[in-house]
Image (cartoon, rainbow, N blue to C red):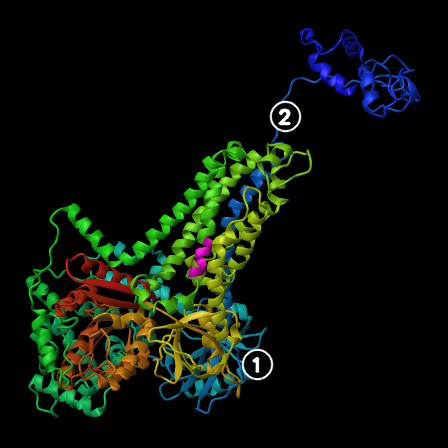
């Protein structure tokens, strides 16, 4: 019957088909829905025969309700006045109907209005919040470092008479330092030095003229019992800290008889420690005032100088009065000249300038002295220097006084001479002056040496250079001045190189001849466009490998992006998601694949051992392994760009998805089923799905990693940078989970990630196999300029090349925090060595850990973990026919290893490599800061019989070429080189130059020297200004047709 009914519904209206008889058609037309229900179900319908009609459940006419007798009552359905809350089985026959409402629309985004904007606002605000956190952490580290600089006071005694140990509080920004205090009753002074005896300052307690001292004031802390300050007029306060109150009281008890012995009394006042430090006159405060003092001196001496150039700022009446009333102590006078207060040069000059003999230099006295030295009167300056050393005021210098003058000049550069060598120099200079040896030297004889025509131009320009003050100089506009300038520049390197060693004379003569070769081989394009194109082509030639690989990588990355974007834009139209979300799907899918590719590629750039291995193979000719750090930053930047695209694209996608019914989304997301009809909100997709939630977490991780990877964070909060950078593990886990939700596509990340991951894990295991062995430090030495020298045991099977670097961690500072440093030892040496300069929190703490003053008696030197060695561009110096090594400051460390290697190879006759010549340029403030490097150079010179290495030392201790001290030292240096064939300052055959090197001129002269060389290797390491200047010089030289200078650099 049911089948008949279904067929009849289709065919009963067509009488022509003859499918049904008239009887059958009548049955079909008279059939009710109740009959159909009774036939096809078990429901009992009223009026049906048999059991289906008994215990009726549905009335016969199922569409009409006839009253209370119907088996299926429908109470209150049609009564508009009945409340909706009437229960259906309450027995109330009233019907219910809802009130009619006006026409309205339904917002499918309802429920997501708050979570959507707040989520993206929170992500946007997270960036400045993380930057703020980074800055706060950096400031906290600085405060922690300042606190770490506060020395631990131990009760110590010294065997030196009238000498006491304490800690000096220098200032709120300068921290504290261990000092020795010595009472000098004979000279009525209190001397302050460091624990090694290096003078730091002195307090002059003598009365001179208007300066009358009758008492010394001391402020003692009443709360801590360990702090006190020594105060006297015209001096910086000496704030001291002792181990305990007893130690401080003992010092005061010794101070009182010392003061009585020199005719002074002691006045003691009690204050809190905070008050003492707050009211102390610190070196920093005094220096700010002295800075303005010297600038006004310059302004008065050079009338033509613009006041704005002196950077004086606004001077109020009180500050002007303070400057006018300043009385310079000898220590301040010496610091202004960047010299030691105990040096003979400073003492004699101070006595000469102190015309009223008060023991201080007034504003007028210093101005009068400065005006003389700032003039163009060269002979007047020589007379002034003569009077400085004519302490007997007889108008002549004895030979002993003359030799003492030379010694004092040498003292300025921390140099010294043996007596025999000093006698040779004095004899030579006496001969130049035409004075018989042993006779007295008059001022006229003195002028023949220091004011001769050879040095007249330099001496005329000589002035008194002040620390931190830029001195105005006259333009070298005359032809004579131009010739002198060109001559000075030409002698910078190669031309001026003459070691006076046997066997090198022919080499020097040949070098002199080659320098004079014509320079017309340089061909410049004539048009502006041609010059720009030529410069560009030269730049491409220099960096062709880097450009090729970066371009290739970028093209592959673009291809990965476009392939996925095209697929979801055109080949997945049938899925409907692209039509729903628009171009957001195209962007996010392409960006997602680009992210997979870039983030996976970063693992390759982090595989240090693999890089070191391959750079030693033939592959170094085809791939720039030394540029992996550059590639790492470039790939990371691209990854960030595509991450931002991915996030923005998902913002559009999630908006569209949040407006769709669950049933529809089940069709769009074939791999994801949501068994409910409730409309899913934005926060559901973002926070309640694994894809959305891991995406939010990954975004947070990326923001934190990139913010803390900024240069500022690396410099000021390295520990935070290192820890946040190690979140890459968390990021990769989140990326794997992010794709496991399978919302749009099956996971693809593993195909990008697994190969680099395997390489990285193997590389990491190699490192872990090395750095879990404790390395014994055999010797730790604190050197000048905050350099710490560490000599430690060389592990078994540790093979490396000169110029390579390692990573170390100090067990006392945390075994998991590694920092990279270049090895200064050579491959043939038994031990490994590092020279580390304290420039940040970790290196400062490392210096403190290895400070013998901080180690308890019998305590072992802290041990290290070692990881490496790793490759560096500097180790390729031997691949170039001519290598130019330039080291500045502590950046000289990689070249220490290279020079040691050259010495060793020259001894065993193993100079079998392409390199035929090495130029080593050492730029240093004073070579005495790196005596260990001077010893290495000396050993090179002793073993270098063929002139393989040319060494030139540039001393930048004096800021200007035409400084009066530099001029005097320059004249003595040239005389000594003529006599002894080596430098007066370093004791080396290497040429010593004053001031900073002119890199372009140097490279040009070297190019002239080696005209058959097509490719020069330039290797630099040091401060950023040095490497940038050398990079510009290489770029300038590469603009000229001919040889190419390939620059490898590392900033320290």
Q: Earlier in the sequence, mark 1 or mark 2?
A: 2
In front of the other: 280 or 512: 512
Give the side of residue 274 with respect to residue 478, left or right: right
Give the side of residue 342 with respect to residue 139, left or right: left
Q: Which residue is mark 2?
A: 106
Region of the chain picked out in magenta, as a range: 599-604
In front of the other: 319 or 798: 798
Q: Nearer the viewer, mark 1 or mark 2?
A: 2
Q: Is residue 631 above or below residue 663?
A: below
- What number is the disc on residue 751? none
Q: Does the image show residue 307?
A: yes
| Secondary structure mainly formed by the magenta segment | helix
Q: Is residue 545 above or below residue 892?
A: above
Q: Is residue 188 magenta?
A: no
- Estimate how packed mark 1 is, as few (under 14), some (14 to 19) or many (20 or more) residues with alpha carbons within 10 Å: some
Image coordinates for residue 546, horizontal then vertical, percent = 31, 57
- What number is the disc on residue 245? 1
Give the side of residue 37 with respect to residue 1043, left or right: right
Q: What residue is shown at x 7% (from left), y 73% (from top)?
A: 513
Q: Quadrant of the N terminus?
A: top right
Give the secondary structure at mark 2: loop
Q: Does the image show residue 239?
A: no
Q: Is residue 603 magenta?
A: yes
């Amino acid at each position: 019957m049911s089948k008949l009914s279904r067929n009849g519904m289709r065919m009963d209206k067509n009488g022509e088909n003859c499918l049904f008889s008239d009887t059958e058609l009548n049955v079909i037309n008279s059939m009710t829905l109740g009959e159909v229900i009774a036939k096809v179900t078990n429901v009992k319908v009223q009026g049906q025969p048999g059991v289906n009609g008994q215990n009726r459940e549905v009335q016969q006419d199922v569409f009409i309700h006839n009253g209370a007798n119907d088996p299926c009552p429908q109470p209150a359905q049609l009564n508009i006045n009945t409340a909706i809350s009437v229960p259906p089985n309450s027995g109330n026959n009233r019907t219910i109907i809802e009130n009619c409402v006006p026409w309205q629309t339904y917002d499918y985004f309802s429920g997501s209005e708050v979570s959507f904007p707040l989520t993206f606002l929170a992500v946007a605000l997270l960036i400045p919040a993380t930057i703020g956190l980074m800055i706060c952490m950096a400031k906290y580290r600085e405060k922690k470092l300042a606190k770490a600089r506060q020395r631990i006071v131990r009760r110590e005694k010294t065997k030196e008479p009238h000498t006491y140990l304490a800690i000096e509080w220098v200032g709120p920004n300068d921290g504290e330092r261990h000092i020795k205090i010595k009472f000098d009753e004979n000279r009525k002074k209190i001397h302050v030095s460091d624990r090694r005896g290096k003078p730091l300052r002195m307090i002059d307690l003598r009365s001179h003229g208007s300066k009358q001292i009758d008492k010394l004031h001391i402020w003692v802390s009443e709360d801590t019992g360990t702090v006190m300050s020594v105060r006297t007029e015209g001096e910086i306060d000496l704030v001291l800290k002792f181990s305990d109150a007893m130690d401080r009281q003992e010092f005061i008890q010794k101070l009182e008889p010392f003061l009585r012995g020199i005719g002074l009394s002691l006045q003691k006042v009690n204050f809190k420690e905070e008050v003492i430090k707050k009211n102390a006159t610190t070196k920093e405060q005094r220096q700010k005032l002295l800075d303005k003092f010297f600038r006004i001196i310059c302004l008065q001496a050079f009338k033509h100088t613009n006041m704005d150039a002196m950077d004086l700022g606004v001077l109020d009446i009180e500050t002007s009065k303070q400057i006018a009333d300043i009385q310079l102590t000898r220590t301040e006078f010496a610091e202004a000249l960047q010299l030691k207060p105990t040096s003979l040069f400073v003492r004699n000059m101070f006595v000469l300038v102190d015309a009223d003999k008060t023991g201080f230099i007034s504003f007028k006295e210093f101005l009068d002295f400065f005006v003389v030295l700032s003039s163009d009167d060269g002979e007047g300056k020589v007379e002034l220097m003569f009077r400085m050393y004519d302490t007997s005021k007889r108008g002549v210098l004895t030979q002993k006084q003359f030799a003492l003058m030379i010694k004092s000049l040498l003292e300025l550069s921390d140099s010294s001479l043996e007596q025999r060598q000093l006698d040779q120099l004095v004899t030579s200079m006496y001969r130049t002056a035409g004075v018989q040896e042993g006779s007295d030297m008059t001022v006229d004889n003195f002028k023949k040496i220091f004011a001769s025509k050879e040095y007249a131009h330099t001496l005329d320009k000589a002035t008194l250079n002040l620390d931190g003050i830029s001195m105005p100089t006259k333009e070298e506009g005359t032809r004579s001045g131009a010739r002198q300038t060109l001559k000075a520049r030409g002698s910078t390197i190669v031309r001026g190189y003459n070691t006076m060693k046997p066997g090198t004379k022919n080499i020097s003569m040949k070098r002199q001849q080659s320098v004079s070769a014509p320079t017309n081989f340089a061909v410049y394009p004539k048009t502006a466009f041609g010059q720009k194109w030529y410069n560009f082509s030269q730049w491409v030639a220099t960096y062709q490998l880097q450009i090729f690989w970066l371009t290739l990588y970028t093209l592959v990355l673009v291809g990965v992006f476009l392939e996925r974007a095209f697929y979801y834009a055109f080949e997945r139209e049938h899925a409907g998601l692209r039509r729903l979300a628009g171009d957001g799907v195209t962007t996010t899918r392409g960006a997602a694949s680009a992210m997979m590719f870039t983030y996976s590629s970063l693992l390759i750039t982090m595989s240090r051992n693999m890089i070191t291995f391959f750079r030693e193979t033939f592959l170094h000719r085809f791939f720039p392994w030394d540029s992996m750090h550059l590639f790492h930053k470039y790939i990371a930047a691209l990854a960030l760009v595509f991450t931002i695209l991915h996030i923005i694209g998902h913002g559009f996608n999630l908006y569209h998805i949040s407006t769709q019914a669950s049933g529809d989304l089940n069709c769009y997301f074939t791999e994801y089923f949501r068994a409910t009809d409730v409309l899913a909100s934005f926060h559901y997709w973002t926070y309640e799905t694994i894809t959305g939630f891991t995406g939010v977490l990954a975004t947070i991780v990326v923001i934190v990693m990139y913010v803390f990877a900024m240069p500022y964070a690396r410099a000021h909060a390295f520990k935070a940078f290192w820890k946040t950078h190690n979140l890459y593990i968390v990021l990769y886990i989140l990326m794997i989970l992010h794709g496991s939700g399978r919302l749009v596509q099956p996971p693809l990340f593993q195909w990008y990630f697994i190969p680099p991951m395997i390489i990285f894990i193997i590389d990491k295991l190699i490192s872990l196999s090395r750095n879990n062995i404790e390395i014994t430090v055999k010797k730790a030495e604190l050197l000048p300029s905050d350099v710490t020298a560490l000599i430690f045991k060389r592990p078994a099977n540790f093979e490396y090349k000169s110029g390579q670097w390692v990573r170390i961690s100090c067990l006392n500072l945390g075994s998991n925090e590694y920092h990279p440093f270049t090895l200064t030892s050579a491959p043939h040496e038994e031990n490994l060595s590092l020279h580390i300069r304290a420039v940040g929190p970790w290196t400062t703490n490392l210096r403190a850990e290895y400070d013998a003053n901080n180690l308890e008696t019998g305590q072992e030197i802290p041990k290290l973990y070692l990881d490496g060695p790793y490759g560096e561009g500097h180790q390729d110096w031997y691949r170039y026919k001519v290598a130019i090594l330039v080291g500045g400051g502590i950046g000289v460390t990689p070249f220490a290893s290279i020079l040691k290697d050259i010495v060793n190879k020259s001894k065993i006759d193993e100079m079998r490599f392409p390199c035929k010549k090495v130029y080593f340029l050492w730029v240093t403030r004073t070579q005495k800061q790196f005596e260990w490097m001077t010893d290495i150079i000396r050993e090179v010179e002793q073993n270098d019989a063929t002139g393989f290495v040319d060494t030139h030392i540039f001393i930048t201790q004096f800021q200007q070429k035409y400084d009066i001290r530099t001029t005097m030292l320059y004249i003595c240096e040239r005389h000594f080189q003529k006599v002894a064939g080596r430098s007066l300052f370093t004791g080396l055959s290497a040429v010593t130059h004053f001031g900073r090197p002119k890199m372009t001129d140097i490279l040009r002269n070297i190019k002239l020297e080696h005209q058959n060389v097509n490719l020069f290797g330039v290797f630099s390491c040091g401060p950023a200004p040095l490497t940038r200047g050398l990079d510009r010089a290489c770029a300038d030289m590469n603009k000229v047709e001919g040889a190419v200078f390939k620059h490898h650099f590392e900033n320290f």
